[in-house]
Amino acid sequence: MDKIRGVIITVTVKNKADRPYYFKIGQAYHDHLMENETIKWLIEWTDPPAVKMAKSRFPELGGDYGWEIDPGQTRTVKFKLKATGPFGDELSYISRAGEDPTYYWPLVSEPGLYTSWFLPNELETLNTDLKIVNWTGTFGFSLYNVDYEPVYGIVRAPIVPSNSKLIYSDPKATFIDYESVPGAYVAAWDVAMPGRSYSYFEYAYQWPAGGGEGYSYYGTPLKSNFGAAGGEYGGNRTTTVPGRETGAPWGPLIIGGLVTVAALAYTRLR
């Protein structure tokens, strides 16, 4: 299967009204990210073909596109997005808004890279005549170890839908984080990466979560895939102990040099 560089969304919408509506793909995502940062992305394709909206909020991204939905109609649409600029084709990282920069020394807890979230049914909260019947999103992102030494740590899915069920991940998620984001089940991986190396991750969520056990969350830690168990690559696993002057800064050094790159894409349905 080809790697997804971005996100593919499939959503089924029902128009409960006696009049037609248009709904469109949003072109920026900014909720719960670092201060003053906005992820902007490009529409790579849509199925069925989307039409250009009369008003565009981000004309520099090619204009807003969406679909008409007739009275009483239930319509399924699918589209592919890819982020551009920061959090996309520029190296960047994810941290929850308002995080304490943590200046404790000499030892601190290592939380790993955090996550961001959105509401997959936001469309129906903005227009009560439109109901989201089903929503599925598959996300792909890459990590790059900017250090020459191997690094270890926890990486959470950079963005997750709330009130949704994890239905797939590759590599299989090591565990689910139930605490970082209220109402969201965040896929998380225990990683070990050789120096100056890339790794690709893919995961999918479905809304609403529904019943049943669904996806089996627990799997083999990613470090086993890299043959790094037991410190095979050498070095010291306590790479994130802060220095005397620096404390433990948030940023690319949060797990010893892991940053997200080139394959993140985000959506808000509005």
Image (cartoon, rainbow, N blue to C red):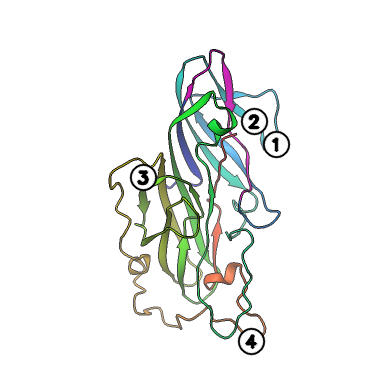
Please identify, in this view, whether the residue under mark 2 or under mark 4 is nearer the observer.
Answer: 4
Q: Is 62 situated above or below 235?
A: above
3D distance between C-alphas at marks 2 and 1: 7 Å
* Three-letter amino acid code at the position of disc 3: Met
Please tell me in which quadrant of the rendered image residue 221 appears.
Answer: bottom left
- Residue name at image x 70 percent, y 26 percent: 55
3D distance between C-alphas at marks 2 and 4: 50 Å
- Residue name at image x 65 percent, y 50 percent: 85
> Regarding mark 1 in the picture, which secondary structure is present there?
loop
Specify the segment rendered in magenta.
14-31
Residue wearing tag 1:
58
Q: Nearer the viewer, residue 25 or 99?
A: 99
Q: Where, quadrant-wise, is the N terminus in this rendering?
A: top left
Q: Is residue 32 magenta?
A: no
Q: Is residue 22 left or right of residue 78?
A: right
Q: Is 167 situated above or below 111?
A: above
Please identify, in this view, whether the residue under mark 4 or under mark 3 is nearer the observer.
Answer: 4
> Regarding mark 2 in the picture, which secondary structure is present there?
loop
